[in-house]
Image (spheres, rainbow, N blue to C red):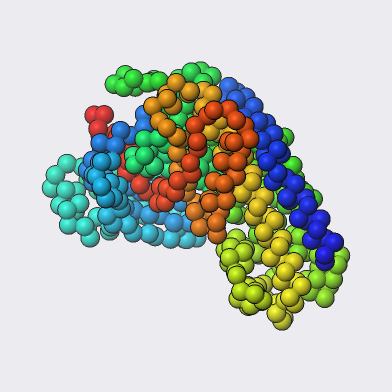
Amino acid sequence: MDTLLKEVQQLFEQQSRLESLMALSNKLQAEFRERLQSSPQCMLPSHNYTLPNGMEHGTYLAVEVGGSTLRVALVDLSGRNKPRRPLRIRRLVSSTIDHDVRDLRGVLFFDWIARKIGEMLVTDGEAGDRMQFKEPLPMGIAWSFPIDASQHLNIRLDAIVNDSSAAVLSRAYIDPSTRLAVILGTGMNAAIHLPISSLHSSKFGLRQFPTTIDTTHVLVNTELSMFGKRAFSTTRWDDCLNAQHKLPDFQPMEYLLAGGYLGEIVRLIVVEATETVGMFGGVLPVKLSRPYSLDTRTLAAIEADDHPWLSPSCKLLQETCSLLGPPTPAEMHFIREVILSVSLRSQSYFTAAVHALSSLLHDLDHANLQAVDHVSIGCDGSVVNKYPGYMEKCQVLLDQLTRLENSGRKRVVLESAGESAVLGAGVAVAMANAED
């Protein structure tokens, strides 16, 4: 196994060298500029033009519709200058979007959402009173699902944002140096606040721009996961994952570094080790023969294991992968080192993408950045916020790239933006009401 492990480490670590990452960043920047002018799938201007000024205040209804969970919350905004918790979730209720709910057709799905909103509101005295006896309760929704005014709720949909735009708004409400945000969990995305002049006019279609504000910038949904097919170096395991995917080449960046795929890359390497160098006695455990049976939570637990003999990891792997017996010390060492190499490559590619986005921002909006002493990037998602040491290692790499570049650009700082979808929806609706 030692020879294969050395090959894995060499392949993944050579893709993580600073010079390689700088070259990758330059390639991504060129692709970003190209897609700002032509692509109908990426660099999509939203209907959010300004960033919050931090003075918006009030209580707002925020709804996040995710792939498997609906979250309904009341969000309190008390102003950026408030010493403690200027932006907070007062109450949040989650509901699983299970198979039966997904099967609801037409307005029935939105009736279900409306019912969940109503159930949450009646448990909050102040919001319930406002809903029943006063003006409609303003609502913002994260992502792109419409809400029908069913169930006769006294609510008014004032703002719709996607997850990455919500992350920008939630972080910018607290920190005025925020201009972009990235999501890295099971999947990935990013949003960036750019001058309207940096996008081709065809991107806006027949849109009528608002006349009540000085419309110079727009929040852009990058669809970051779709970039990088011609930029990233890959291994044979990456190529195997892509070839077996139901949508090959569709989201090349996501397939290489997001949480939905890290475990599968490790699994494919373990499969090769079993078939070629006799790991697990040359017999692949049945569960590991199934694609995507090794998840990122297992990888994170093994990487964080600091016990001398990795005994917690041995037990975890035996349970999650249905091994007939505990892995040998050599097998456990191999698996952990592979995980370290795969996660390092993920951190490196993520950092290169962040560096490319921040460089694009500096180039296209240099004058507007003079008012801040650094650029903050809001970060949300289970990988960037919860994988052991992920954000911290990315910050180190980002600082190293900045020094290597030696361009005099402002420092870029990664900041956690937890619960950004719900909080960002709340900020968006607060901004909409402030404009009225």
Q: What residue appears at the point 26 percent right and 29 percent down from the top-left corner?
A: 435
Could you say where residue 203 lies in the image, as x and y percent from the top left?
52, 23
Q: What residue appears at the point 68 percent right and 55 percent down from the top-left corner?
A: 342
Q: Is residue 61 in view?
A: no
Tell me the quarter of the image containing the C terminus.
top left
Q: What residue appears at the point 75 percent right and 71 percent down from the top-left corner?
A: 331
Left or right: 381 in relation to 128:
right
Q: Is residue 130 in view?
A: yes
Q: Is residue 326 above or below residue 266?
A: below
Q: Nearer the viewer, residue 196 or 149?
A: 196
Q: What residue appears at the point 25 percent right and 47 percent down from the top-left corner?
A: 83
Left or right: 417 in relation to 140:
right
Could you say where residue 63 lies in the image, as x and y percent from the top left?
36, 48
Could you say where residue 356 lies in the image, as x and y percent from the top left?
59, 34
Tell me the quarter of the image containing the N terminus.
bottom right
Q: Is residue 335 above or below residue 423?
A: below
Could you say where residue 390 lies in the image, as x and y percent from the top left?
56, 53
Q: Nearer the viewer, residue 337 or 237?
A: 337
Residue 326 placement: quadrant: bottom right
Q: How many marks?
A: 0
